[in-house]
Image (tube, rainbow, N blue to C red):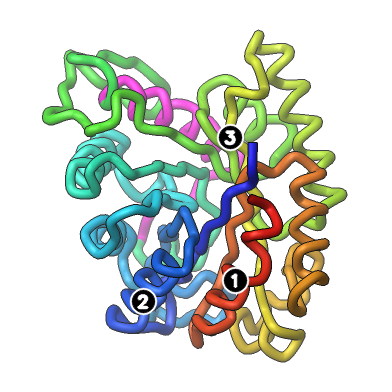
Amino acid sequence: MPVRFGVHAGLQNTTVDDLRGVWRRSEDAGFDWISVWDHFYAADASGSATCLEAVATHTALALDTTRVTCGSLVYSVGYRHPAVLANAIATIDQLSGGRVVLGLGAGWHRYEYDAYGIPYPSTGVRLRQLDEAIQCVRGLLTQERTSFSGEFFQLQDAQCDPKPVQTRLPLWIGGGGEKVTLRIAARHADGWNVPFLAPETYAHKVRVLQEHCGREGRDPATITKAANVGYARDDADLESQFADMAKWMRPGTLMGRGQEVVDGVGAYVDAGAEWVILAVRAPFDVDGLERFAAEVIPAFR
């Protein structure tokens, strides 16, 4: 199966007009995926609150595009009750004509939790919330009525109507935790994504996911595997986009042009990635994305 490519355009320090320009030009250039994230503050250590909201932006993405998959990497289960999120996503899938993928994660950006007074429990608790939330969302999106009695979430004969266009709207899990997150993915998810890992580290995570699938009696081939990677012209461009996070991201970033980037993508494909999704932030280098589409994507078709 040929690798597919996407763009994950951060919602911080940008405008609606600039973001729409990225979406439209990325779709026209030949990318097959565009995604949003779920933050209220900038996804870094700056403390900036200049960030567009996820559900509203996901809706705009669905309406502004015609062909690409409209993804999310990823919605934090701590920000919305899973029934609220399921209803929103069902409607967004209707608006997109059946092009939505819902990514879910346990959340990590404590600064914005604390700023808004949202409880930020331990990692173990947040992962148990994730395990319950994906089950609740799956039931609501696929079953006529859903009941669920968990530690954190309860549904009683609950309905989500109208349903998505897709009979089984894909649910992805985001994260690389080997003991719990990958087990949740193996047990419940249609897809899995992890950001900013070097290819060799990504390959190791794929092997761990496969081991969890074996224990769960799941065929690993039924889980779509995506690598979310940085994309920059050079180190200066990476620092311009990601500031204090640039050094941490560097091992999982594609840089350069032409064959150098083709080889970098090839390393992720060899490691097991079926999707390579380019994470970019403002100031967006849309010309660079179009150049990537022209120089790199054809090498994998």
Q: Does residue 47 sit above or below 35 in this rendering?
A: below
Contact, CB < 8 Å: mark 3 with mark 2?
Answer: no
Image position of 274 (left or right of 77): right
Q: Does residue 115 sit above or below 97 in this rendering?
A: below
- The three-letter code of the residue at mark 3 reads Thr
Camera sees residue 248: no
| Image coordinates for residue 164, horizontal then vertical, percent | 23, 33
Q: Quadrant of residue 113?
A: bottom left
Mark 1 lies on residue: 294
Say which label, 1 or 2, has the lower sequence index. Answer: 2
Say which label, 3 or 2, has the lower sequence index. Answer: 2
SS state under label 3 = strand
Residue name at image x 34 percent, y 29 percent: 137
Q: Which mark is residue 144?
A: none
Mark 1 → mark 2, Cα distance in angstroms: 21 Å
- The three-letter code of the residue at mark 2 reads Leu
Mark 3 lies on residue: 224
Q: Quadrant of residue 255?
A: bottom right
Mark 2 lies on residue: 19
Quadrant of the snapshot with the N terminus: top right
* Residues rendered magenta in the picture: 117-140
Image position of 295 (left or right of 189): right
